[in-house]
Image: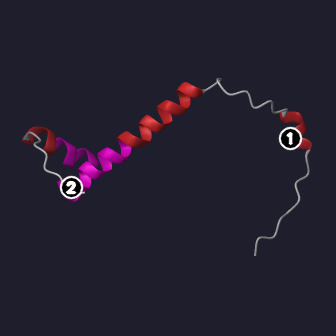
């Protein structure tokens, strides 16, 4: 998607310096991807403890898993 944004020169320069990206487009793309990743992690952390998986770790450790050949 193409879009036009207005960023002040000081912020754009700092973003380029901190990201070490070759272009402002690459720096903005990296910033967006980083933001999305952090928000996904935040959502997962907020869910922590809300799902009861009823997993017995000792039983899981002692379970022998069959190897499945998918070829």
Residue with the mark numbered 1: 60
Front residue of 58/1: it is 1
Mark closer to the chain start, 1 or 2: 2
Residue 44 percent coordinates (x, y):
54, 33
Residue with the mark numbered 2: 25
Residue 18 as seen in the image, left or right of residue 59: left
Binning the other alpha carbons within 10 Å of mark 2 as few (below 14), some (14 to 19) or many (20 upward) gives: few
Residue 40 as seen in the image, left or right of residue 10: right
Front residue of 20/25: it is 25
- Residue 37 quadrant: top left
Number of the label disc, if any, that sits on residue 17: none
The magenta segment is: 14-34
Binning the other alpha carbons within 10 Å of mark 1 as few (below 14), some (14 to 19) or many (20 upward) gives: few
- Residue 31 quadrant: top left
Front residue of 25/1: it is 1
Residue 32 included in the magenta stretch of the image: yes
């Amino acid at each position: 998607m193409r879009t036009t944004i207005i960023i002040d020169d000081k912020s754009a320069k700092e973003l380029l310096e901190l990201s070490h990206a070759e272009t402002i487009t690459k720096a903005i793309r990296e910033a967006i991807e980083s933001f999305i990743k952090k928000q996904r992690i935040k959502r997962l952390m907020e869910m922590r403890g809300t799902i009861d998986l009823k997993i017995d770790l000792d039983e899981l450790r002692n379970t022998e898993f069959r190897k499945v050949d998918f070829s």
